Amino acid sequence: MTQSAREADSALTDQLVRTVWSGSVYFRIAFAVLGLGSAGFAALMLYTFQRGIGLWGNNIPVAWAFAIVNFVFWIGIGHAGTFISAILYLLEQRWRAAVNRFSEAMTLFAVAQALLFPVLHLGRPWFAYWLIPYPDRMQVWPQVKSPLPWDFAAVFTYGTVSLLFFYLGLLPDLASTRDSAPERWRRRIYGVFALGWRGSEDAWRHYRMAYLLLAGLATPLVLSVHSIVSSDFAVGLTPGWHSTIFPPFFVAGAIFSGFAMVLSLIIPARKAFHLENVITARHVDNCAKLLLVTGLCLEYGYAVEMFVAWYSGDEFELWQFFVTRPTGPNCWAFYVMMFANVLLPQLLWSRRLRTNLKLLWVISLVVNLGMWCERFVIIVMGLEREYLRADEAAFNPTWVDWGLLAGSVCFFLFLFLGFLRWLPVVALSEVKEGRRERERTLAQAEGARG
Amino acid sequence: MAESLIAEFGDDAALARAIDRVRELGVRELDAHTPYSTELVRDALGAPPSRLSTAVLVGGALGAAAAYGLEWYLVAHLYPLNVGGRPPHFPLGFVPIAFEMGVLFASGTAFVGALFLGRLVRLWAPVFEVPGFEHASRDTFWLTLKLEPGSANAGSVERVSAELAALGALSVRELPGGTA
C-alpha cells in the first residue's frame, strides 16, 4: 500500500514536471508565431504612442471604443481564474485542484492585457502616473469621487492579489521542480524562485493559513472588480448604461467569459500534454456546467435590462434597446452576442454534447467572441445613439484597432505558452494531497465494513 | 552540544507514528518536511493554528483606514471640488478605494507573513545537504528532531535512531547543521 502510494506520487510528479524539462519543436514553432504577433502588437503600440489615437476609429460621441471594449473583455476573462481558485476553494470543491493553476495563470495574463488598453487610450500614456495620488506641487489630485480612480484601484489590486495568490500556490511545486531539475543551473533558477521551500510543517502551517486568507480576500475582490468596472458605465447617463443591474450583470458576464476561456485553453493543453488522468472528463464537464449556469445568469441580465428599458417608458432607453441595437450601425455585434451567449450555451444542457470535447471547444471559442461583442454592443452602441439626433454617429474601426486586438490575443497566448513551457501546469502538491485523502477515506470505509 | 537527527519515511502514517513515539521518549524539538500537508502529520505535531490571521486583519484595517484618510485629505481637505453636487467629504464614494486598498494590504500581509513566519526566502538550509532530501518535495516524508543533552528521557542518539528504524524509517542520519 505504502509502496504503491509512493510510486504513484513519484510518477505523478514526473508526469507533471516533465514538460518543464522537455520542450518540443511544436513549442518553438508556436513561440515563433506568437512572438511575431506580440512583436506586431508592440509595434502598433509604438505607432499609437507616436501618432496619437487619431489612428483609431474613435470619434465624438464614440470616444470609448475598442480600447475600453478590449479592457472590459480581458478583465472579464480574468474573473474565472479567481472564481475557480478562491470561491471553489472556500466551498471545498476538490476538483478545482486540477484546473486552478491554468486558470490563475490565465487571470494574470488577461489582467496584463487589460491594463495596457486604458493606458493606450490616454493618448498621452506618459502621464499614466497621474492616476496615482503622488505628492504633486500643483495640487491636482485624482478625483476619488469618480468611478475611474476606483477602477484603477480595483484593477491594480486585482492584478497584484492574483499574482500573490498564483505565486503562493506555486511555491511547493516550484520546489518539486527544483528538486527534479536535471542540471545544476536549472536547479539554481527554480531554487531562487522556490524561495528555499523545504516543505517544513511549520512553513505549511502558515502557508495554509495564508492561502485560506488570500482565498477569502480574493472572493469579495473578484465580485468588486467587475462591479466597479461596471460603475464606469452605470454612473454615466448614457442610455443603455445607466442601470442598477450593471454590477451583478457584469460579474456574471465576466465569470461566463472566463469559463469559456478556461475551456478554450484547457481542452487543447490537456490533449497536448496527455493530462487526461489529472484533468479528467469530469473536470471538463464541471467547467461546462458552470459555463451553462453563468450563461443563464447573464441571460437573466439581458432579459432584465430589456424589461427595465420597456417598463421605464423612457423613449431614449426604448430607442437604445429596441431600435439601435437590433437595427443601428454595427448591429451585427448584437446578433453575434445573442447567438453566442443566449442560444449556443443551451446546447450544454445535453450531457452528450457537453462531453464532446471538440464541440465544447468550438462553443467556448464562440462564447469568447460573443462576450467581446457584448462589450462592443454596450459601449459602442450606447454612444452611437444618445439623446440628440444631431449627435448620432457610427463607429468604424480602423486596421490599427483590429491589429491591437489581434496583437493582444497573440501576446496573451504567448505569455500562456511560456507558462505551459516553464511552470508546473497543475497544482501538484494539492493533487497529491487530494488523492491521499481519498485513499484514506476509502480505507476507513472498508475498515468500517470489515 | 545538541545533536540533530533526520529520518525518512515512506508515508505520512509512518511519520505520524514516529512523531508520537519520539514524543514519548521526551524529544520536544520536532519538525516534519513533507511533499504535501497532511492531516495525520498536522495532528501528530499538534502545532497551534497560525497567528497570521491577526496580522492580516491589522494589515487590512490599516490599509483601508490609510486609503480613506488619504482620500479625505486630497479631495475634502486640500482641494475640495464641487463635482455633480457631491459634498467634499463623500463617504459612499470613498468606500470603493478604501475597500480595495484594505484587500491589497491584507493580501500583502498574508503573503509576506507566510514567508516570514515559515522562515522562507532562505535559499539554503542544512536539510538540503542530506542525501535524498530532494524526495521531500516529491514522495517521502521526513522528520527532523533535536536531542537536548541532559533532558529527561531523550536517551542517546543511537537509541532514538534504533527506535526510528524500528518504526519503518527508510533512512536515519545525523543532521550536522541542526534542524530548521
Image (cartoon, coloured by chain):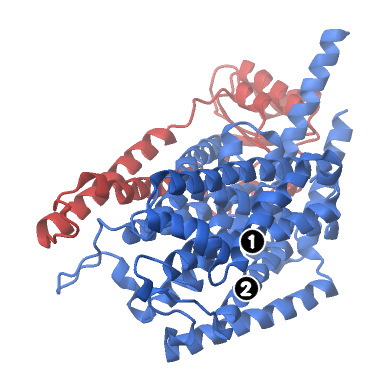
Chain colours: A blue, B red
The quarter holding residue A401 reads bottom right
Q: Callout 2: residue from which chain?
A: A
- Using the image, determine if residue A410 lies above or below residue A166: below
In this image, B99 relative to A217: left or right?
left
Real-space Cα separation, disc 1 to disc 2, in angstroms: 28 Å
In this image, A93 relative to A388: left or right?
right
In the rendered image, residue B64, in percent from the top left (x then y), is placed at: 29, 45
- Using the image, determine if residue B13 lies above or below residue A280: above
Residue at 59% from the left image edge and 73% from the top image edge: A408
Mark 1, residue position: A335
Depth order, front residue of B157/A300: A300
Kindly report which numbered mark, 1 or 2, lies closer to the viewer in this rendering.
1
Q: Earlier in the sequence, mark 1 or mark 2?
A: 1
Residue at 68% from the left image edge and 83% from the top image edge: A36
The quarter holding residue B29 reads top right
Depth order, front residue of B154/A322: A322
Mark 2, residue position: A411
In the rendered image, residue A298, in percent from the top left (x then y), is placed at: 58, 46
Depth order, front residue of B169/B101: B101
The quarter holding residue A130 reads bottom left
